[in-house]
Amino acid sequence: MSVFLVNPSDNSFGTAVITPRWLFVLAAATPTSVGDPILVDESLEAIDPDRIHPGDVVGISVHTGNALRGYQVGRMARQRGAWVVYGGIHATLFPEEALEKGAAHAVVKGDGDLVWAKVVADCLGGQPREIYEGGRIAGTDFLAARWDLMQPQKYMWASVQTIRGCPKHCSFCSVWRTDGQQPRQRRYQSVIDEIVNLRRLGFKFVALADDNFYPVTLTDLRLAREQNNQAKLQELTAIREERFQLMEELARLPQDMVFFTQITMEAGEDGDFLDAMRKANIKGALVGVEAVTPEGLKAVYKDWNYSGDALAQRLQTFKDHGVHVLGSFIFGLPTDKPATFDATVKMAMRAGVTFAQFVMMTPFPGTVDFTRWEKQQSVDPAMVGDVPITRYWLIPWESRPKMFTPHPTMSSDEIRDRTQKVWDRFYNWSAIWERSACCPDVTSRIAFIFLSKLYRQMYAGTGISSDSARRRKSRRWARWTARQCKRLFQASPMPELESPSWEPAFLRDDRRDAGQFSVLEN
Ligand code: B12
Ligand code: SF4
């Protein structure tokens, strides 16, 4: 029998931007007794059903966007006699749905690092449970990924996680509810070992796939001090110190390495942290700006963010410290007006953000926004065919609306149209050319231009090219650009690169094979 791990996707580009980390972590969690698992990333290539045989174990990860495709794969695998197991954020939130629509034998809720070995053993024993609680494991238990099973020539960026959880509570985000508000830091030695491993393979671009790389703000420290809460102060200081330790170690890695992460805007007031990031070669960060007006920020429970001139200044600070910003903006908030679109793109350009994404307000399950919307809909639920709109991920793509929550003054088409125009304006040739001036030489300037166009093509999914001919053409273009970009990201492997030697206390933990683990409650 074989263990398959499948990352479902409707779109296969042959090349992908970032490695889906869960695939390689679950590979590491697979008991050695069953051999290496077979990894299938459908964003590269769709799964071939003939490879699945009776008795195989098929692990499928679903987030809300790929749940429908995931369920298709699961039904196919079960029909072929395999054990079907789901995990990932969507399965954690809707385990019954995976059992019913995805033909699951079992669903893992929460982290899979430690519980997966038990699930595989139970399947092989013929008696899997329906639900497994993977829980929120301690940072010291996070597994390093099995990069030896990756096809390096297929990905531009690798992904390594250094921390899970986020102390904030934004209304549109599920992270603080599923991953918890208590930051769980991985041991920095384990992070560095994994990155060294990736550089040996020829990866110099690594995304730090963290919810929030800056879990302790200066304000948090000040408040703990003012409240004379010594225990809290000690805890926060320890987390912060470990962040700095990690960055010091990153700074010792080969200097051609480039890291990218996700961070809150508050880091903009912490010059020491930004300087440490620059030294660590963390050259860019996704910053959730969300809205450029105070009303918009209040609507998403993010009024600790800046707006207006202060916002432009704050974002500029990142750049001044050598950290490029990928600004993330949301459109479709109840407070948005037609003028908001123009104000947002102008702000993005004025604030000097290097990349930007403009996403349409989507109520993701597990968020405050989703709960509120589901409650509103419970009275007289809107339906698309026989699916309630609050289960929009089950609606086939062709008939799925592009926006789900009605806006008080603008139609969905108007919001989509205006959002698309903002993407076009931010990523027009002359704007990209101007921004590319941040590159040190001609080659990197060309890389920057390609990457900007690819980013726009892959992520501006507001659906304006709704007819299939235009969609096909746009996919062909994205495929071609992705291939060119891949070349720009390639580095020569450094097989001789050595890991620092760590103290003996830092040992590889093999408790997973024994099925023993502890779960944090928070
Ligand atoms: C890094 C990241 C990205 C990166 C990289 C994506 C990639 N290729 O990997 C980028 C920036 C590209 C990205 C894009 C988007 N992302 Co994102 N992303 C993340 C983030 C921060 C970390 C994901 C990660 O790699 N974690 C590390 C791995 C090891 O953890 P994991 O995936 O949770 O897997 C563990 C468990 O879930 C479990 N598990 C997972 N799968 C399986 C399967 C089995 C069988 C088992 C047993 C267990 C199991 O075990 C794993 C190990 O413990 C998460 C936040 C989060 N906390 O999940 C958001 C998150 C997944 N993203 C989210 C969203 C919304 C998006 C976008 C739609 C944003 C946008 N508007 O464009 C796009 C969609 C892109 C796409 N088509 O997939 C949401 C998803 C919400 C939802 N309900 O689906 C999340 C949860 C963040 C949020 N704000 O709520 N993302
Ligand atoms: S959007 Fe970012 S800052 Fe807000 S809760 Fe989610 S991870 Fe934290």
Image (spheres, grey):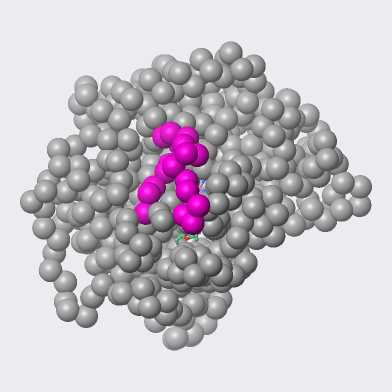
Residue at 33%, 38% in the rendered image: 155
Residue 45 in view, yes or no: yes
Query: Is 279 in the magenta?
Result: no
Q: Above or below — where is 406 with respect to 501?
A: above
Residue 422 lies, in percent from the top left, at: 57, 26
Residue at 38%, 36% in the rendered image: 17
In which image quadrant can residue 339 be found?
top right
Kindly report the secondary structure that dominates the magenta region of the rendered protein: loop
In which image quadrant can residue 145 be found?
bottom left
Residue 499 lies, in percent from the top left, at: 14, 61
Residue 226 in view, yes or no: no
Q: Above or below — where is 300 with respect to 392?
A: below
The foreground one among 489 and 125 is 125
Residue closest to the far left: 496
The foreground one among 258 and 312 is 258
Residue 407 as seen in the image, left or right of residue 235: right
